[in-house]
Amino acid sequence: MEHQEFNEVKQVKEHESKLLSQDKVENLIQQAQEAKVSAYCPYSKFRVGAALLTTSDCVFTGCNVENACYNLGICAERVAISKAVSEGHNKFKAVAVASDMSDQFISPCGACRQFMREFGSDWLVYLSKPDGTYLEMTVNQLLPVSFGPDDLSMNKVAN
Ligand SMILES: O=c1ccn([C@H]2C[C@H](O)[C@@H](CO)O2)c(=O)[nH]1
Ligand SMILES: [Zn+2]
């Protein structure tokens, strides 16, 4: 097998080994839908919930939290990630996102994509609808050609 072809097969296998079972995805989406109930969104009235699965199989949830000073509002995804990191968890397998939109999959904003990317590019994001259907994407698919910790010289292994 050609070297490049071998690497492609290896990458596909690595990716497949990181995918969650249908049961686990459905469970994570369910937790995101439950987290959505706590959304504090008196201004947009757009409820969002997120459920973040760590590599140690803990789940941290989050909802959007808005503010009378509109620009201070924070998204569900960043709340969930901040809760996890502040409790000592910063390695993630997946995050599920849920909203009330039945006609389209909720998709994380640019700020949240960059916030996710800080903790790796090859973990999974499940964009869901209220009926439980979902799209599976990687952080890299949502934010290709990204800027991350390794791009800072202070974080490089060797110069
Ligand atoms: O993926 C998303 C998209 C939007 N919002 C929030 C931000 C704001 O409170 C409201 C409307 O944009 O929804 C999230 O929490 N996550
Ligand atoms: Zn966001």
Image (cartoon, rainbow, N blue to C red):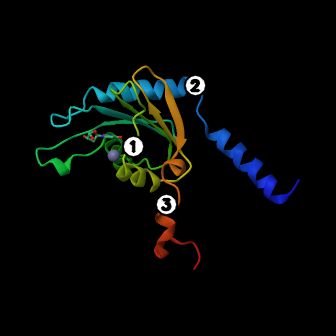
Amino acid marked by disc 2: Gln
Disc 1, SS: loop
Reply above or below: 18 against 118. above
Furthest residue toward left: 68
Q: Is label 2 within 8 A of ligand 1 (CB to nearest ligand atom)?
A: no
Percent of width and height locating residue 110: 38, 51
**On-image quarter of the C terminus:** bottom right
For image coordinates 12% across by 49% down, the residue present is: 69
State which tag comes first along the sequence, 1 or 3: 1
Percent of width and height locating residue 59: 43, 35
Percent of width and height locating residue 75: 30, 43
Disc 3, SS: loop
Q: State the residue in front, 28 or 7.
A: 7
Reply above or below: 34 against 48. above
The residues bearing labels 1 and 2 have C-alpha atoms spaced at a distance of: 22 Å
Indicate which label's residue lies in the foreground, 1 or 2: 1
- At label 1, counting other C-alpha atoms closer than 10 Å, the crowd grade (few under 14, some 14-19, many 20 or more) is some
Q: Which residue is mark 3?
A: 146
State which tag comes first along the sequence, 1 or 2: 2
Amino acid marked by disc 1: Pro
The residues bearing labels 1 and 3 have C-alpha atoms spaced at a distance of: 15 Å
Q: Which residue is mark 1?
A: 108
